[in-house]
Image: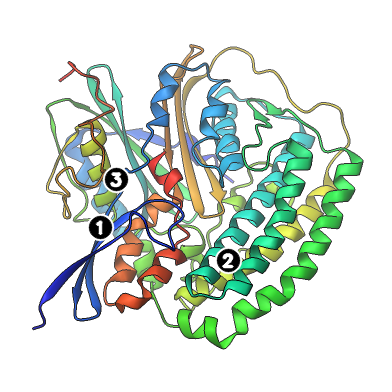
Amino acid sequence: MSKKTIIPFGPQHPVLPEPIHLDLVLEDETVVDAIPSIGFIHRGLESLVEKKDFNEMVYVAERVCGICSFMHGMGYCEAVEHLMEVEIPDRAKYLRTVWCEFSRLHSHLLWLGLLADGFGFEALFNEAWRIREKVLDMVELTTGGRLISSVNRVGGVLKDITPDMQKAMLDAVDKIEKELKPVANTFLNDYTVKSRLCGSGILSKEDAIALGACGPMMRASGIEVDMRKTGYAAYDNIDFDVITSNDCDGYARCQVRIGELFQSINIVRQAFAKMPEGEELSVKPKGNPNGEYLMRVEQPRGEAFYYVEGSGKKILDRFRVRTPTFANLAPLVHTLKGAPFADIPLLVLTIDPCISCTER
Amino acid sequence: MEDYGRNIVEITTDQLVIVASEERDKNHRLSQACASYVNDKYELLYTFSDGYEMTTYKLFVGLDEEVPSISRIFFPAFTYENEMKELFGVKIMGIVTDYNNKFYRIAKETPFLKKGDK
């Protein structure tokens, strides 16, 4: 038997935009075990619920993470709205759907860039992030912020998308779609990319269920689950299929995310086509939250949970968030076992780790 | 689609392993588990799902009460259980991969449990 060596991976590493640490147990060049540890940027945001009014907590929720900011704010609002049985205006539902899909676009493009950077394909990294800038420009135009948008409130949204902005967004998605096609083609067909991703980090359908995987990580193992199908925001009026792959490897995860990019563009077009006219963007909730509710939304990285509990006071008793990266830690450890040491950075990237979310 | 967000069932500590075994037999997924600190006790939530169907089990446990780990039934529970143990100080017994307070690299011990409560 070979001698075992423990190699620390992270918390600072070129492929990691945020800190996570892995102790990798190696036999020669093969990883036989991986021990993750987190907490380097732990902020304890959930505890702030004991001090903030339930309306103010929206701004705390959306600061759980910059990349997933809009959806964290929306997930929290949807949870409180369900708890208080508030029906938000239809236009607000569609506006949330549009911003959700722009969030997914910029998150997946960020990930594609990081992946390309991970295997040293810098031209592809530049292209992915250049396209992402267009997405962020549109988010800034409509919300005033590039990452932290602060447009959600309990009962609806705070800002409208004017006809001029709508035209700018639709023109932007046309351009993004056109520019994305050759980039997607390179990711899916280039020899370099395929040689690094195909057959690496296998997570079978059975393992994905047993290990509690979620999001693109789960869908790339052939499981057809996407929380948008539960019909929050305006998704119950949007026609879309859940994108899956049966290849179960790193390439399949890339394939699913690229499919979701084009799907998001399609959803934005549908949402604008179906969005009702109207001045009303929000309703004022009556009373204070009383009871408990567990809300699920489909973040770019997978299903996120928001648990809220109130007892009729302005301040909620409890607020808990379960983020997708936290759920994907156990599947990550599984995929690392048996992998060559050189593949570890890419395998870590294939779960699209968001450590800010995980640490909240 | 049915509103599963309200499908929250209260159970006792004794029932936890039984409930988890039943969920495993149905080939359900462990979607999340979390703890909250409520004055003199912990509130633990375990959510299991099958596609879009979801059931959440809630249990209240005392500060010194031992809670059995479900990581032998659902392996991914080890991350949630280590979190409950390290951030809140919940006494989870028999975690398959117990990090012994090294999962979260934080300076403060059980930061979500207020000083003097235990």
Name which residue lies at 24% across and 53% down: B21
Tell me whether the residue at label 1 lies in contact with that at label 2, contact meaning CB atoms closer than 8 angstroms. no
Question: How far apart are the alpha carbons under marks 1 and 3?
Answer: 10 Å
Query: To which residue does mark 1 refer?
Result: B75
Question: Tag on residue B80?
Answer: 3
Question: How far apart are the alpha carbons under marks 3 and 2?
Answer: 29 Å
Circle 3: element type: helix
Q: Amino acid at mark 3?
A: Tyr
Circle 1: element type: loop
Q: Are marks 3 and 2 on the same chain?
A: no
Instruction: Tell me residue A260's x, y (percent).
Output: 64, 63
Instruction: Tell me residue A145's x, y (percent).
Output: 69, 38
Q: Are marks 1 and 3 on the same chain?
A: yes
Mark nearer the viewer, 1 or 2? 2
Q: Amino acid at mark 2?
A: Leu
Chain of the residue that carries numbered disc 2 in the rendered image = A
| Residue A45 in view in this figure | yes
Q: Quadrant of residue A140?
A: top right
Instruction: Tell me residue A101's x, y (percent).
Output: 68, 51
Q: Nearer the viewer, residue A85 or A313?
A: A313
Question: Tag on residue A112?
Answer: 2
